[in-house]
Structure formats: C-alpha cells, structure tokens
Amino acid sequence: MNSIVYVGMDVHKESYTVCCYSFDTDKVMYQQKMPSDYKMILKYLGQLRKKFSDDTEFVCGYEAGCLGYSLYHQLTEHGVKCIILAPSTMAITNTSRVKTDKRDAGNIARCLAFHTYSEVHVPTDMDHSIKEYIRMRDDQKINLKKTKQQILALVLRLGKKFEGGKTYWTIAHMKWLKSLKLGGVFQETLEEYLITYEYFTEKIERLDQRIEELASGEEYEEKVKKLCVTSDRQKMTGTYG
C-alpha cells in the first residue's frame, strides 16, 4: 500500500506557508514559507519526493478563502491532488491559542490526514455555465423592473391613476393601462413601453422554464430537492441561515 503525505497550505494573497504530515512519523515536518506562486508549491513537492519513497502519494489542501478556486485549478492541472477545506468544519488540532501561519498549515495537514473536515465543492464547467445563465436571467428581471417603473412614472406624470385596486401588474391593471387614451406621441410612448414590458415578461417566463429543465436534469435534480426541503423547513420554523 502506498504511503500518503498530507501537505497543509496556509495561503494568503502575498505568501504561502506549507508543511507536511504523515502517519509514519506522526509529526508535522518541512515547514516552509514562500511567495504566493503555485510554481513554488510544485517545487516544494519536488523536494518532498526526494525525501520519501517513490510510491508516496501527496495530498495538498488549503482553507476556502481569498484565493477561491484558483490555486486548486493550478495544482490539479499539474497532476497534484488538491482539496479545499470548509473552515467551519475543520477540527482544531493546534492546542495553542496563538495563531500563526505555520500552526495553521500544520492544522490543515492534520485535518487532511484524519479527515476532520468537509470538502468544498469545486464548480464544474457546467456549474459555471448555468451560473452565467441564471445571472443573465436576473439581468432581464432588472430590465423588467426598470420598465415597470418607467410605465408607472409616465402615467403618473400625465395625471392618470389606477382605481381598480392597490396591486399593479394584475390582469385588471394591465387592462387599464392598455385602455388609456393619451393621444399623440404620449400614446405612442406608452405603447412602446408596454411592448417592452411584454417582451421582458415573456422572455423571463421562457428563461425560467429553461432553468426548471436544467434543475430537473440528472446532475442537479437531487441537489435541488434537498435545497427545496431545507427552504420549506426554514419557512415553517422561521429560521434562515
């Protein structure tokens, strides 16, 4: 069975502090501080390989934070196994209350070794593409909201007041807007706004339908169900994280 060496990385914008831990020695070793460049970590791993047997496997890890997924992708693209740890789930193996980069790196290495952490999900290309699709849909919602505000402002400036209820954008309200006789260019302006309103409304309905299709796909169906259950539970209890 191959031995495993766990490399803890305390990463910051300007510098990385790294060290390693293995069950064979049961201690944190080879602590080193370096500039914040993934190539320096590759160099560090190269040095470690000379100190351990040829069949040794290296597992690197760092806390989720300012670097996001960038270091993860840089290392995995070079064949290095890397894990991003959720900070709130990590066990504290450092008994000293004094926090230092070296101690934090050692804590990360031990958490990796003893599996006392939860791994952060790294978005796939599909995740990223759907995120951009939803962001685009949200942009259309902003456009629709702005159009609604423009319509309400126009009719208010012209002294028109909806008397059919307190709620706007209902069937009754839309029927009232379309029945207004403003005359001339005023009428043209309102009609253009209403065309824009209907365009964004229909577009958002179409985009929402597509998002529902994506959510019901094999990759996301179970995750969406869990989110819905959590959301329903929070509504019932009045607790929100």
Image (cartoon, grey):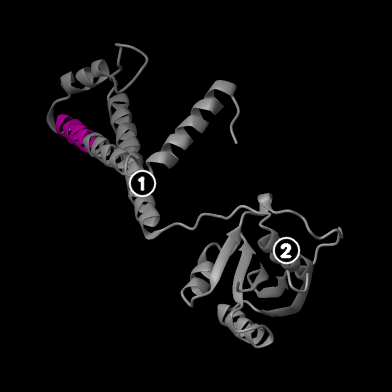
SS class, disc 2: helix
Quadrant where the C terminus lies? Answer: top right
65 left or right of 123 in image = right
Q: Is residue 192 magenta?
A: yes
Q: CA distance from mark 2 to mark 1?
A: 39 Å
Residue 232 position in % (x across, y down) = 49, 26
List the residue tagged with mark 2.
110
Question: Which of disc 1 and disc 2 is earlier in sequence?
Answer: 2
Which residue sits at x=58%, y=55%? 119
> What residue span does the magenta drawing correspond to?
186-199
10 shown above or below 199: below
Residue 141 position in % (x across, y down) = 34, 39
- Front disc: 2 or 1: 2
Mark 2: give few (<14), some (14-19) or many (20+) Cα within 10 Å. Answer: many
Taking depth in this image into account, of 41 and 132 the one nearest to the observer is 41
List the residue tagged with mark 1.
134
Q: Is residue 172 magenta?
A: no
Residue 149 position in % (x across, y down) = 34, 33
Which residue sits at x=13%, y=26%? 183
